[in-house]
Image (cartoon, grey):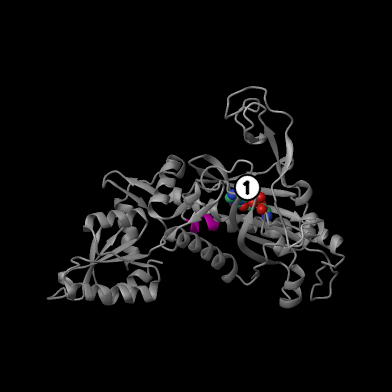
Amino acid sequence: MMRCMNEQENEAKTPEVKMAHEVKLEDIVSLCKRRGFIFQGSDVYGGLAGTWDYGPLGVELKRNIMALWWKMFVSDRDDMYGVDAAILMNQKVWQASGHVDTFTDPLVECSNCKGRFRADKLDDPDRCPTCGQKGTFGEARAFNMMFKTNVGPVENDASVSYLRPETAQGIFTNFKNVVDTIYPDVPFGVAQQGKAFRNEISPRDFVFRSREFEQMEIEYFVHPDKWEERFEHWVEQCKNWFTALGLPEGSVHELEVPENDRAHYSKRTIDFEFDYPIGREELMGLAYRGDFDLGNIQRLSGKSMEYRPKDGSASYVPHVIEPSFGVERAVMAVLCSSYWHDSENDRVVLRLPYELAPVKVAVCPLAKNNPELVAKAREIYTKLKKEIGVVLWIDSGNIGKNYRKMDEIGVPYVVTVDFDTLWGDTKDTVTVRSRDTTEQQRHNVMNLLALLGSAK
Ligand code: GAP
């Protein structure tokens, strides 16, 4: 099978991949722009800080990551259910959750240049990083990061809403709906993917700290006595996720967050940090939220959030374990981990796992002016596209340059249709070139789908 062959080839021929922190962030940003993965938001008007647009390849990569997550944590499990809640929610949601009062970052302003900064992210807390003046910051003030808006044509206190700063609350507010319609046994989880918005004081480091980003969150409801063992279960699940993303062993670190650094709702938190080119930073978080959210909803809405076990035992408000994944930070970790400058072959390669690669295979007729050859290549392309989805057709440029282009966007295989495909003993065979090893092997067209399928 192709996968097995290539795994052996990889072991034999591919030099060690650099760890993500040894890669330069500017190389990733430049590749993303050049090849159509990620662009600055509103670029044509000079940009809008903290916003990013995904291009044709980026959107495929992002969707593949999100689809893999959904498969791993929802479809493949018996204890998980999905929801897709509205982004705009009743303002009471954010009062109950504590976001209106406490979702703040410390903001300082320089009296000299008027620059505004997040006080806890300054290298020197007393020196302005823009103008270099010392002692120009006043007292830090609490800046609420929620984007406020009004729902409907009247702007007053009753019409206030917010762009959600986390997807989690759309899960908590649907807890009762899920229980009353699905009747799940505890423990069970509810998952949601979608946009979140935070008015970050200093968005920075490419997509790492954005003002609009995407989350994939799970609220896993447990009996209060069982939270510790379920928490450990989710630590293991998070590690499986990092492996599925292809993050190198040793590049993700567990940080037990001390009490005074934890979010207002959390009784235990582990931050999983990744060695990004910008340093070791949070990739995702795992928090024990107790009954903070359901308890607050119960108080403010007056509706019971109690769960009644089917065996007739006492009702209780479930506690919650929350694995919270940021899509952008996963995208960035995957890009940085897979970026490889292969100096021996003078090429840049994105060694993306097959499942995440935006394009799985490219089909290339060796000569574009030979109708018979092009027709055969088209036939193969159409068949692969129908079965695999994103397949590229390349019929311009020289073959070597095309290989390099495909390497840079992480296409695992290039199928070349040449004159041997048309005639003689080699009729109906094509060359399959591997991205990771540059090895080329001849395969029968009939076996192509099985070969590529086995690479999943
Ligand atoms: N519901 C819990 C929650 O939202 P969080 O630690 O504030 O927890 C969870 O956010 C994850 O969302 C982070 O670990 C990170 O991956 C992602 N995230 C948070 N703020 C972000 C931002 N400004 N830009 C990109 N991703 C962000």
Determine the image quadrant of residue 438.
bottom left
- Pinpoint residue 267: horizontal percent, then vertical percent: 75, 49
Q: On the rendered structure, is 319 left or right of 369?
A: right
Q: Inspect the image, locate mark 1, and give the three-letter code of the amino acid beneath it.
A: Asp
Name the residue that disc number 1 marks: 271
Where's the N terminus, which quadrant? bottom left
Q: On the rendered structure, is 92 left or right of 79?
A: right
- Pinpoint residue 180: horizontal percent, then vertical percent: 76, 76
Q: On the rendered structure, is 255 left or right of 276?
A: right
Which residue is depicted at the point 38% across and 75% down? 387
- Pinpoint residue 243: horizontal percent, then vertical percent: 50, 56
Can residue 439 be seen in the rendering of this structure?
yes
Image position of 26 with respect to 369: above or below: above
**Outermost residue to the front:** 153
Can residue 284 be seen in the rendering of this structure?
no
- Pinpoint residue 236: horizontal percent, then vertical percent: 59, 56
Q: Secondary structure at mark 1?
A: strand
Note whether ligand 1 is within 8 Å of mark 1. Answer: yes
Which residue is depicted at the point 70% across and 58% down? 321
**Dot 1 alpha-carbon crowd within 10 angstroms: few under 14, some 14 to 19, many 20 or more:** many
Where's the C terminus, which quadrant? bottom left
Closer-to-camera residue (200/215)? 200
Q: On the rendered structure, is 400 left or right of 273?
A: left
The stretch drawn in magenta includes residue 39: no
Give the magenta part as a residue range.
Answer: 240-245
Determine the image quadrant of residue 36.
bottom left
